């Protein structure tokens, strides 16, 4: 018999989970109260400074995490030392690959990141017992696949101007899931340095800066202190991703 879901303020829900974004919008939303209690026994929250390594490729995979705040860079290092950012993860994304013994990518904090982590053995057992959790993880996997395909299009076919606009549009719609993206301006601090943005988009630092200046002069974005971005109208920057 399926356990009936209770209100998030119910005392059966662990205190650490009640206001957690991953509890409401992330994978933990698929768990019932008893499963949350079991998981909460093993969770710990941690904060990480910009550029801090979260895990390395080929390292043993011992924990999974929910991203509670900030942006995580997923990178791949080539034998000659060249690096490519192959993905970005935001709150409330799930960080890790179920049932794999080793990590396939390097993960770094792009800015100040907060994680909620738990042993992989605990969650792997919950996945086996919870079709809802397995379904939620599958949904995220498909979403990441869609985003990877969109990134292939961006890298392979879009102009430099469209690439930068696409990147800023993605940040604007992912950086704060609580924002209303349909009304009013959106403001955020760039989570990535210019060098990281260039790496992610396959451009030079100079090209990134030049295209952001063009967007500013066109009134599509405002830039303060070289890092704070204000987008007055999301539709205008969306249009710029395909022009």
Image (tube, rainbow, N blue to C red):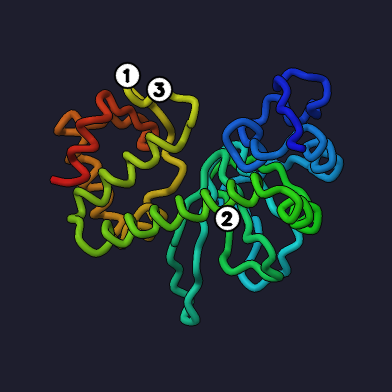
Q: Residue furthest bottom?
A: 79
Q: Are marks 3 and 1 in contact (CB under 8 Å)?
A: yes
Give 203 or 150, whichever is nearer the viewer: 150
Residue shown at the point (25%, 51%) measured from the top left? 163
Specify few, some or many for label 2: CA neighbours under 10 Å numbering under 14, 14-19, or 20 or more.
many
Residue shown at the point (46%, 81%) measured from the top left? 80
Q: Quadrant of the N terminus?
A: top right
Q: Quadrant of the C terminus?
A: top left
Q: Which residue is mark 2?
A: 108
Up/down of 149 relative to 185, above or below = below
Q: Report the Cα–Cα distance between label 2 and label 3.
A: 28 Å
Among numbered discs 2 and 1, the one appearing first in the sequence: 2
Q: Which residue is mark 1?
A: 183
Q: Which residue is mark 3?
A: 180
Specify few, some or many for label 3: CA neighbours under 10 Å numbering under 14, 14-19, or 20 or more.
few
Task: Determine whether the residue tagged by mark 3 lies in a helix, strand or loop.
Answer: loop
The part of the image, by quadrant, that contains residue 11 is top right
Task: Determine whether the residue tagged by mark 1 lies in a helix, strand or loop.
Answer: loop
Q: Is residue 20 visible?
A: yes
């Amino acid at each position: 018999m399926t356990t009936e879901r209770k209100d998030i303020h119910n005392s059966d829900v662990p205190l650490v989970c009640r206001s957690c974004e991953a509890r409401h919008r992330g994978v933990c939303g698929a768990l019932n109260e008893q499963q949350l209690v079991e998981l909460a026994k093993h969770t710990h929250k941690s904060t990480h400074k910009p550029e801090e390594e979260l895990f390395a490729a080929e390292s043993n995979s011992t924990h999974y995490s929910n991203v509670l705040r900030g942006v995580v860079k997923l990178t791949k290092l080539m034998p000659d030392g060249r690096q490519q950012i192959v993905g970005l993860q935001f709150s409330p994304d799930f960080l890790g690959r179920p049932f794999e013994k080793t990590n396939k990518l390097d993960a770094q904090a792009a800015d100040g990141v907060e994680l909620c982590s738990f042993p992989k053995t605990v969650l792997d057992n919950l996945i086996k017992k919870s079709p809802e959790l397995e379904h939620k993880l599958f949904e995220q996997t498909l979403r990441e696949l869609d985003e990877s395909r969109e990134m292939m299009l961006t890298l392979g076919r879009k102009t430099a101007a469209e690439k930068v606009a696409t990147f800023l549009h993605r940040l604007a719609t992912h950086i704060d899931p609580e924002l209303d993206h349909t009304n009013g301006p959106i403001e955020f601090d760039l989570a990535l340095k210019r060098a990281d943005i260039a790496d992610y988009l396959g451009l030079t630092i100079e090209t990134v800066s030049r295209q952001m200046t063009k967007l500013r002069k066109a009134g599509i974005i405002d830039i303060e202190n070289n890092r704070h971005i204000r987008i007055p109208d999301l539709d205008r920057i969306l249009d710029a991703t395909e022009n």
